[in-house]
Amino acid sequence: MSSAGSGHATGRRIALAGTGFYGYIHSISRALERLGHQVRTVAYPNMRNGWRSAPRRLGVRTFENLTRRRVLRALMRHARDADLVILLRGDLLRPEDLQSIRDRMRVPLVLWLIDSVRGMSNGLELARQADLVLAYNRDEVDEIRSCGTQAYFAPLAFDPERYRPLPGLARDVDVYYVGSLHTDRKQVLDRLIARLEPLGLRIVVDGPFSSRFRPIRARRTMQRYPSLARVARNRTVSHEHINLMTNRARICLNLLPSQATDALNIRAYEISGAGGFQLINRRPIPTGLLEDGADAVGFASPDEMVEQVQRFLAPANRARRLAVAAAALKRASAAMTFDVRVQELLCRVDTCCRRPV
C-alpha cells in the first residue's frame, strides 16, 4: 500500500483510494493535481486477480483483511480534511466501510468502476453506499440507478504522460498485441499467427502466457497453441515499453474482454493516444467512443481479422492506415485523457451529489 500527498494550494481537497491497477490510480491523481486540486492517494495491490482465488490456508485472506483495515484507516485519516472521496473500483472495502465514511466524514463519496459491476461480488452493494457512481459499461447505468444512486457512463481514458507519439521511430513491427492471454485470446492469436507467419510478417505478443510454477500446464499450453508459443514473450511489461512498441507497430491488435458489453477497454484509448492504428474485435464499435473505419477498424471474426491485417499491411493502404491512426490521435488527445475524465467527474459531483462539496 502506498500513500502520498501533493498538489497546489488551490482547488479541492480530494482523498483518492483504490487498486493500484497497473498505476492508473496515480495517473488519475496526477490529472487532478494538474487541474489544481490537492490529492491524498492510497493505493493497494490488485486483490481481484490471484489473491482471492488462493486457498485460505496460505493466509491470503488474512493478508487481504489486514490490507483492508490499513486502507480504511488511511482513507479515514485523509478524508477528515477532504472535500471529496473517490474510490477506484473499491472492491477491497465492504459496504459498511463506505457507509461509515459517508456517515462520519459528511463529504460526497464517488465510486469509479473501472470494471463491470456485474463481475464484482459486492458491486451493487457498494454502489448503494455511494453518492455518485461512474459506470464501466453504458448498459449498466440503469441497473446501478435502481439502487437509488446517481450514476452515469464514464468511458476509460489514457494517460498522456505515458502514451504519446514518438516521432521518427521506424514502424518495424507488423502486428503488436499486449494484454492478458486467457483461453479465448490464445485461440484467436494462435490462429492469426499461424496464418500470418508464413507471409514473413513480424508479430510481437507481450503478456503472461504460462507460469513457470506450473510446468505441466505450461507444457500443455505450448502444445495446444504452438504458433503463439513461438511468438509470445511471457512477461508483464511497463507502460513505457507498451508505448514504444505501439509506436513501432504498423497494426495494434486489441481484443476486448467479455466484460466490455457496451464499452471499450483502456487499451483502446492507449493505442489511440500513442498514435497507433488499431484493429479491434467489435463490430460495430460502441457508438460515440471510437468510430469504426474512421478512428479504428473493427472485425467480427478471426477470419475477418486476418483479412484486415493483410489488407492494411498492403502498401496501397499505407496512407489509409496512417489517416485512421492520425484521426484517432486527434480525437483521443481532445476528449479521452484522464484530465478530461476527472473534469467531467467533478462537474457531475457539483450537479448530482446529494451533498454539496
Image: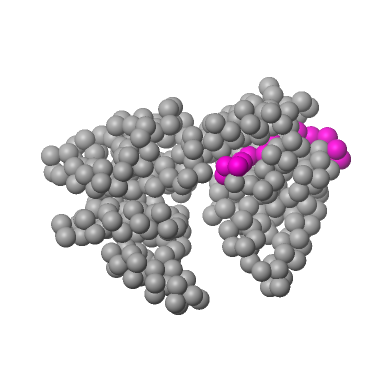
Is residue 180 left or right of 136 when viewed as pictured? Answer: left
Is residue 207 left or right of 101 when viewed as pictured? Answer: left
Q: Position of residue 347 (x, y in %)?
A: 63, 26
Q: Position of residue 131 (x, y in %)?
A: 73, 32
Which residue is drawn at the image coordinates 31% and 59% (left, top)? 190
Rendered view: 141 above or below 78: above
Rendered view: 69 above or below 295: below
Which residue is drawn at the image coordinates 51% and 39% (left, top)? 156
Frontmost residue, 309 versus 77 = 309
Which quadrant, please, contains the C terminus? Answer: top right
Q: Quadrant of residue 226?
A: bottom left
Q: Position of residue 104 (x, y in %)?
A: 86, 40
Which residue is drawn at the image coordinates 28% and 56% (left, top)? 191
Q: Examine the structure image and report whether residue 105 is included in the region drawn in magenta.
A: yes
Query: Coloured how?
Result: one colour
Report the span colored magenta: 103-118
Q: Can residue 326 be seen in this view?
A: no
Q: Examine the structure image and report whether residue 209 is included in the region drawn in magenta.
A: no
Rendered view: 71 above or below 264: below
| Residue farthest along the left direction in this orientation | 316
Frontmost residue, 95 versus 157 = 95
Q: Where is residue 168 in the image (x, y as percent from the top left)?
A: 26, 49
Which quadrant, please, contains the N terminus? Answer: bottom right
| Residue farthest along the right direction in this orientation | 104
Frontmost residue, 266 versus 214 = 214
Count of picture labels: 0
